[in-house]
Image (cartoon, rainbow, N blue to C red):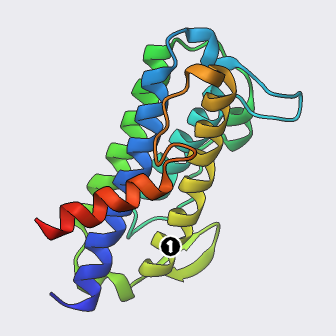
Amino acid sequence: MSFKEGFLKDSIKRFKYYKELGDKTFAQLKEEKDFFYQPSTESNSIAVIVQHMYGNMLSRWTNFLTEDGEKEWRKRDAEFETTQYSKADLLSFWNDGWKCMLDTLESLTADDLMKTVTIRTEPLPVYDAILRQLAHYPYHVGQIVYIGKLIKNNSWTSLSIPKGNSAQYLDSVKEAQKK
């Protein structure tokens, strides 16, 4: 496998991991109102973050190699307005945005990585446009997870190594590697 092929494969793997963190957070949020909770007036709710990510993903990844990643039809400012979508609507946006992005990434070839795309008229090599989004989406997924933890508090189920269990986790990994 070439470096470029590995880059694409590993980028897709990382994106899927961050989607999974969001999915696991959503699974813990039982009430629709949880998606609209705002920790402060300057904070975004999970619903707003999902709306923004959906708009960004559709804009960036639709006709990725042939059109500017900031589409004329995108209404970015509206993505940050509180709406009253249902939980089902928000999860549909979430899944549709990720599908658009992952389908596009999976269609790329190693040769595509050195092509040039534009985002807001800025020319970027494809690999850099991927890295740009690999920084952007985890930033927002982290916000989603953090808000989920605030909402669930003591009933939150850790998505990684629970507090105080680092040594136990490392021991289990070492034991699994011996097998």
In the displayed structure image, the side of residue 134 where residue 36 appears, left or right: right
Q: Categorize mark 1 by other alpha carbons within 10 Å: few (<14), some (14-19), many (20+).
A: few
Percent coordinates x, y for residue 108 in the rendering: 26, 71
55 or 47, which is in the foreground? Answer: 47
Residue 138 position (above or below residue 49): below
176 or 53, which is in the foreground? Answer: 176
Residue 127 position (above or below residue 77): below
Helix, strand or loop under label 1: helix
Could you tell me how many numbered marks the image carries?
Answer: 1
In the displayed structure image, the side of residue 76 where residue 160 appears, left or right: left
Q: Is residue 106 visible?
A: yes
The residue lying furthest to the right in this view is 41
Residue 66 position (above or below residue 88): below
Q: Residue at x 56, y 70 (%)?
A: 132
Percent coordinates x, y for residue 89 in the rendering: 46, 18
Judging by the rendered image, the residue that carries numbered circle 1 is: 131
Q: Residue at x 54, y 73 (%)?
A: 118
Q: Quadrant of residue 52?
A: top right
43 or 148, which is in the foreground? Answer: 148
Percent coordinates x, y for residue 83 in the rendering: 67, 18
In the displayed structure image, the side of residue 138 where residue 97 appears, left or right: left
The residue lying furthest to the left in this view is 179
Q: Residue at x 64, y 66 (%)?
A: 120
